[in-house]
Image: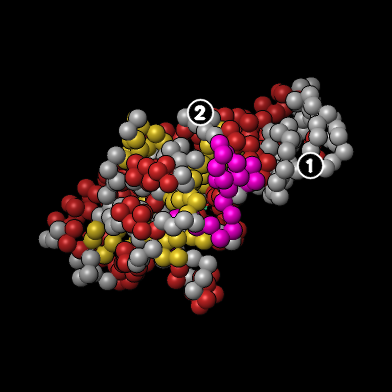
């Protein structure tokens, strides 16, 4: 098959066939007809993702390699941040970001002990995804839950001071469904009290926020940001995630923890980049012990493969277009729901609370969140919307403290704290639902969603 060809020519021929295969057998969808299923999220890709994936497979490096380097650099450039580490999921990114704050290397930062110890407190919310909170509990630190606001679905910053104690060391929060939390207030609170800020940016990639010094991408204002590349998210590589920071020390710790806890920074397959592999003194090891096998942390292996990164590189090239489409789809749903309700003789806001962007924010929406007014039964709305083919979602855990994973802690009354009450969090658990705005949605699908939701409310 490849007679008289160089390896490069053979690879080119394979990749051309893959591109044709993708064009012919993927993404050939019929026009939308009412009744067709409209999922809340879906991958949007073409021949570029597939050829990158196969190119990486043919190279057969498998572990982090040239596509990983390219992705980490391009992703950091896009966000305008110095350091990015690719990992194997958003949950791993949150684990790595949090555990970075527990490093002994933070026990003396400009004369202050900034290290998070077991028993220290971390301010967060219960209305969200479990793995924003799980690393805090797994380490033996104490999450302190603060209520959220409706219709922003983010932390109620008026309650931050009440949540503070002399054990508070950090704030770890997600930007809910793409809507940035009040970064001005949260950052100012963290700076004033010397707290770390981790932004779980898994649902908000591409969202921007205007700080007093100008616009920034969410995930880059706090000390560490995290992303997820699981298929429903803003971009995908199947499984994948990223941890990013502007701080060289936090980056060094995160890299060490990601890569088995090692001290050495040589990429896999490369040795002695610094030229000092055999001439250092580490711990109580013999002088000159091979730096490649010196461990400064009790680490993990959270690396992704180069095939994931290859898909990510192609997705990233399309990413600004995805963000614009998400914003457009969100605006379409706001207008469409108002119009469809009017046609049926009611005002949408009398039956549903529609989502609202946080002041100073330019959200790259992940979803379109709605809360039923008292006169509307969520179960019957969601049941008829789903029956009409439109997929709905709850705000993940709703109120995380109500889940079975909290049974033991609830019974013993230890291991977590609730600052005040979680009234709105419970409202969201009982009355909210959301639908998608992913870039593959067409105007016909969005119009149909408005019709179906308003029919259910009629
Ligand atoms: C806010 C948030 N953080 C973290 C995650 C975890 O990401 P992953 O599924 O890649 O582990 C999710 C998952 O959807 C999420 O919504």
Q: Position of residue 344 (x, y in %)?
A: 15, 60
- Element at label 1: loop
Tell me the quadrant of the picture where the C terminus can be found.
Answer: bottom left
Q: Residue at x 32, y 40 (%)?
A: 361
Total labels: the figure holds 2
Q: Is residue 181 visible?
A: yes
Give the residues in magenta: 103-128
In front of the other: 111 or 266? 111
Q: Quadrant of residue 452?
A: bottom left
The reply, left or right, for residue 433 in relation to residue 95 is left
Q: Position of residue 100 (x, y in %)?
A: 60, 46
Along the line of sight, which residue is nearer the eye, 343 or 408? 408
Residue at x 50%, y 28% (from the top left corner): 77
* Residue furthest bottom as drawn: 411
Badge 2 marks a residue whose secondary structure is helix
Residue plotted at (39% across, 58% down): 163
Q: Nearer the viewer, residue 333 or 256?
A: 256
Residue bearing the label numbered 1: 283
Residue 318 falls inside the magenta stretch: no
Choose the circle earlier in sequence order: 2 or 1. 2
Which percent across, then down, holds residue 378?
A: 30, 69
Quarter containing the N terminus: top right
| 443 versus 399 height, above or below | above
Does 123 appear in magenta?
Answer: yes
* Nearer the camera: disc 2 or disc 1: 1
Which label number is shown at residue 77?
2
* Residue 200 seen in the figure: no
Q: Looking at this view, is 259 or 20 the one in front?
A: 259
Does the magenta stretch mainly form a helix, a strand or a loop?
Answer: loop
């Amino acid at each position: 098959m490849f007679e008289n060809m160089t390896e490069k020519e053979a690879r080119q021929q394979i990749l051309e066939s893959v591109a044709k295969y993708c064009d012919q057998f993927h993404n050939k969808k019929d026009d939308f007809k009412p009744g067709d299923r409209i999922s809340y999220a879906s991958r949007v890709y073409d021949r570029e993702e597939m050829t990158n994936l196969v190119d990486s497979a043919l190279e057969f490096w498998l572990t982090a390699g040239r596509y990983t380097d390219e992705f980490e650099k391009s992703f950091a450039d896009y966000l305008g941040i110095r350091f990015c580490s690719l990992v194997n999921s958003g949950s791993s990114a949150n684990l790595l970001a949090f555990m970075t704050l527990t490093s002994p290397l933070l026990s003396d930062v400009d004369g202050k002990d900034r290290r998070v110890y077991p028993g220290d407190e971390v301010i967060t919310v219960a209305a969200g995804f479990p793995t924003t909170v799980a690393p805090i509990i797994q380490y033996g630190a104490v999450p302190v839950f603060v209520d959220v606001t409706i219709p922003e679905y983010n932390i109620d910053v008026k309650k931050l001071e009440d949540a503070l104690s002399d054990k508070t060391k950090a704030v770890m929060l997600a930007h809910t469904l793409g809507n940035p939390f009040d970064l001005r207030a949260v950052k100012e609170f963290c700076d004033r009290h010397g707290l770390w800020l981790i932004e779980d940016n898994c649902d908000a990639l591409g969202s921007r926020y205007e700080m007093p010094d100008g616009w920034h991408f969410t995930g880059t204002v706090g000390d560490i940001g995290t992303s997820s590349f699981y298929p429903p998210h803003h971009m995908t590589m199947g499984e994948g995630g990223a941890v990013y920071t502007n701080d060289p020390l936090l980056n060094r710790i995160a890299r060490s923890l990601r890569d088995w806890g090692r001290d050495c920074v040589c990429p896999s397959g490369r040795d002695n980049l610094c030229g000092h592999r055999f001439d250092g003194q580490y711990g109580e090891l013999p002088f000159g012990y091979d730096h490649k096998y010196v461990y400064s942390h009790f680490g993990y292996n959270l690396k992704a493969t180069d095939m994931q990164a290859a898909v990510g590189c192609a997705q990233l090239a399309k990413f600004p277009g995805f963000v614009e489409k998400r914003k457009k789809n969100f605006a379409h749903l706001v207008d469409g729901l108002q119009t469809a309700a009017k046609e049926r003789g009611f005002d949408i806001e009398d039956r549903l609370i529609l989502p609202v962007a946080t002041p100073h924010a330019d959200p790259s929406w992940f979803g379109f969140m709605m809360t039923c007014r008292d006169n509307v039964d969520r179960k019957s709305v969601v049941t008829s919307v789903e029956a009409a083919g439109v997929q709905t979602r709850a705000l993940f855990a709703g109120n995380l403290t109500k889940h079975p994973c909290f049974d033991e802690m609830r019974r013993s009354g230890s291991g977590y704290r609730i600052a005040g009450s979680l009234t709105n969090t419970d409202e969201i658990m009982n009355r909210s639902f959301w639908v998608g705005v992913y870039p593959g949605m067409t105007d016909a699908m969005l119009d149909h969603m408005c019709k179906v939701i308003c029919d259910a409310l009629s």
